[in-house]
Image (spheres, rainbow, N blue to C red):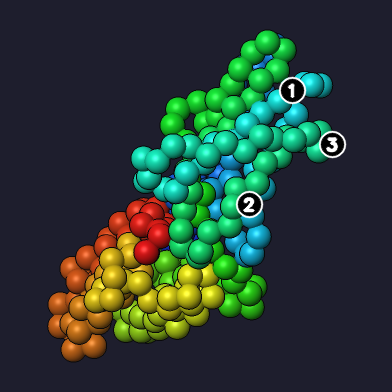
Amino acid sequence: MNTTRWLWLAALLLTVVLAQWQRVSGPTYPLSGHAPLAGTRYRWELERSHAGPGDHLVKLALPAPGATGVVEWRPHGSTQPWTAEPMRAVGDTLEAPLPHQSPGHKVDYRATLSAGGTRLVLPPEGFATLRFRDDVPPWVLIPHILVMMGALLLAMRTGLEAFRRRPEFRLLTLRTLAALALGGFVLGCVVSGYAFSEPWGGFPISNDLTDNKTLIAFLGWVVAAVPVFRGSRARPFVLGAAILTFVVYVIPHSLSMPR
């Protein structure tokens, strides 16, 4: 395998690792775990994102016949008393609704299950936070995700090019900039507009971390592009932009929602 293929393979590996980290580290990824209840090892999962209209239905597996439960909730960050919603048995699940909120708003919630003379509070420590948003059509969401992953792949590949004796940065840098612009700004703004009715929530309009991460990564590559296209010493600038992009993708996605 020649050097070019090894560099693409290394970039792909970095991209896959970072993409998986983005998926599982963010505050909208479901909370889950196992805990003892009614003499069994009970598996639970609490959602942290709700898309579309209507209330969010909290669903937990029925741990034992006759088990009961209650869900408590309040606005995110509030100190007001918890509102209790009794759970009802539906087939093999216990269910309770959380009232729908405006896009971008959150509620904190927890569930308490009782079965076989034992009691379990979920999550075991604290509470889960659920974020509401509107539906995003697949025709824009899927391309947005694919192009942003492509931008990450190109950024990593361009950075690795700096380790060659005679690196060729121009085309790779141009493609990285184009992918970040298309995925982060064009498609990203459309996705955000559908989800939160606000196409851009970063600087200078607001302080949304997800949008600001995109802006920082893009500006890093703009700075790197100047020496690349001037034909001057571009290696440290390209490496810096690639490292900056890596750091940006390490920061969990959607960390600062709501806006």
Label 3, residues with CA under 10 Å away: few <14, some 14-19, many ≥20:
few
Q: Which mark is residue 56?
A: 2
Spatial CA distance of label 1 from label 3 is: 12 Å
Seen in the picture, residue 91 relative to 161 is either above or below; the reply is above
Q: Residue furthest right?
A: 91
| Image spot of residue 175 (x, y percent) | 41, 81
Figure quadrant of the C terminus: bottom left
Q: Nearer the viewer, residue 132 or 97?
A: 97
Q: Residue at x 64, y 73 (%)?
A: 138
Q: Residue at x 44, y 37 (%)?
A: 81
| Image spot of residue 104 (x, y percent) | 46, 62
Q: Residue at x 59, y 52 (%)?
A: 99
Q: Earlier in the sequence, mark 3 or mark 2?
A: 2
| Image spot of residue 38 (x, y percent) | 69, 14
Seen in the picture, residue 201 relative to 118 is either above or below; the reply is below
Residue 33 appears in view:
no
Q: Nearer the viewer, residue 243 or 5?
A: 243
- Secondary element under disc 1, as helix, strand or loop, is loop
Q: Amino acid at mark 2?
A: His
